[in-house]
Image: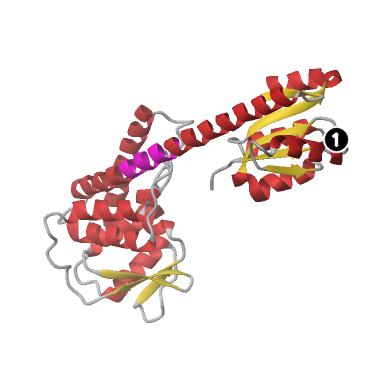
């Protein structure tokens, strides 16, 4: 939905009607008679509102409070204050506090009012276009980071775990796609690209060390039955196994996906690495499906998965990336 409306808040009914009559030729107008009603309008119809104009002096709360609320919760809305000449100090204070784009003095000059509002609408449109471009850029960067994590995990598995990692790792990627792996979040306000790359490298090393430790904790694979293997997994994940030893339910999706979609700079934990470590240790096919209370992990026919195609990793990166959109 494109934001194209102007919200005007004033406790005087005549002022609301006058504003709507003057401004409706250039944009649809919404009105509210108090700060609280203005907040409610923003909460329920904020996606429609491009510009907020508020009177300053209203019973109960001043317009500054509403503008401050809009700045915090609806930052793309262009905020304007209308005041009488005697309230000019409050308007200046609002500007200095970053709460408003500009102020409009009462009584209004029709042409100036319309010109100011047209400029505000244009600014709101530019902000929306900017935010749309930023979102697209962020999505691309998040997808790139997701692909980078998959390839990094492949290298880590190959370097820290003895034997062929491909069978277990392919099951890990398949299960991540099945349960709904997202793109990792990146807070660019707190981290730059160099710091991100450093933290991702440190993260990869930490995951590798934990994978190696889990292989020691799991012990010898030879001779373990599927039921025994599931009991080992249940202990590692701290979840109860089924009485028959045929499956277990993982209540938290992040247990199966956090190594791929965990937020940037999140330190991996032993529990967070346990699922991948167990799949590498077991080396045989398992089934992951949605169940009551979470995701059910159960054994399938014994034996290693069939031979993987040469492009299995590239295909997994593509499919998980598309699913994360």
34 shown above or below 101: below
Closer to the camera in the image, 225 or 145:
145
Closer to the camera in the image, 140 or 116:
116
Percent of width and height locating residue 319: 27, 56
79 shown above or below 175: above
Closer to the camera in the image, 194 or 6:
6
Percent of width and height locating residue 301: 22, 77
323 with respect to 98 (left or right): left
Residue identified by numbered label 1? 58
Q: What stretch is highlighted in magenta?
A: 134-145
218 with respect to 100 (left or right): left
Magenta region's main secondary structure?
helix
Category of crowding for the residue at label 1, using alpha-carbon neighbours closer than 10 angstroms: few (below 14), some (14–19), many (at least 20): some
Which residue is drawn at the image coordinates 27% and 74% (left, top)? 226
The image quadrant that residue 70 belongs to is top right
Asked whether the viewer can see residue 229, the reply is yes
Percent of width and height locating residue 180: 38, 59
Q: Is mark 1 on a helix, strand or loop?
A: loop
Percent of width and height locating residue 310: 11, 55
Which residue is drawn at the image coordinates 80% and 40% (left, top)? 17
The image quadrant that residue 140 belongs to is top left
Residue 320 is a magenta residue: no
The image quadrant that residue 99 belongs to is top right
Closer to the camera in the image, 255 or 185:
185
303 with respect to 289 (left or right): left
Which residue is drawn at the image coordinates 59% and 41% (left, top)? 4
154 shown above or below 176: above
Asked whether the viewer can see residue 12, the reply is no
Q: Which residue lies furthest to the right in this view?
A: 59
């Amino acid at each position: 939905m494109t934001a194209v409306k102007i919200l005007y808040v004033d406790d005087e009914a005549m002022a609301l009607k006058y504003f709507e009559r003057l401004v409706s030729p250039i944009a649809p107008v919404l009105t509210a008679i108090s700060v609280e009603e203005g907040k409610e309008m923003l909460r329920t119809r904020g996606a429609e509102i491009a510009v907020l104009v508020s009177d300053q002096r209203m019973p109960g709360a001043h317009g500054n409070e509403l503008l401050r609320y809009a700045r915090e919760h609806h930052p793309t809305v262009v905020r304007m204050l209308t005041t009488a000449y005697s309230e000019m100090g409050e308007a200046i204070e609002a500007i200095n506090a970053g709460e408003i784009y500009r102020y409009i003095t009462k009584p209004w000059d029709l042409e100036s009012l319309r010109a100011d509002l047209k400029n505000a609408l244009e600014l709101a449109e530019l902000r929306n276009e900017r935010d749309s471009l930023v979102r697209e850029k962020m999505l691309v960067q998040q997808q790139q980071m997701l692909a980078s994590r998959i390839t990094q995990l492949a290298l880590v598995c190959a370097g820290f775990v003895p034997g062929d990692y491909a069978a277990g790792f392919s099951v890990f990627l398949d299960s991540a796609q099945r349960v709904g792996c997202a793109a990792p979040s990146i807070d660019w306000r707190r981290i730059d690209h160099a710091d991100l790359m450093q933290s991702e490298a440190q993260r990869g090393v930490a995951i590798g060390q934990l994978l190696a430790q889990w292989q020691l904790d799991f012990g010898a694979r030879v001779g373990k039955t599927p039921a025994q293997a599931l009991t080992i997994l249940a202990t590692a994940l701290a979840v109860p196994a089924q009485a028959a030893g045929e499956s277990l339910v993982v209540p938290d999706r992040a247990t199966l996906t956090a190594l791929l979609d965990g937020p940037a700079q999140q330190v991996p934990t032993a529990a967070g690495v346990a699922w991948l470590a167990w799949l590498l240790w077991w080396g045989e096919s398992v089934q992951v499906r949605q169940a009551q209370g979470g995701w059910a992990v159960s054994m399938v026919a014994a034996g290693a998965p069939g031979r993987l195609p040469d492009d299995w990793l590239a295909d997994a990166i593509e499919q998980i990336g598309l699913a994360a959109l």
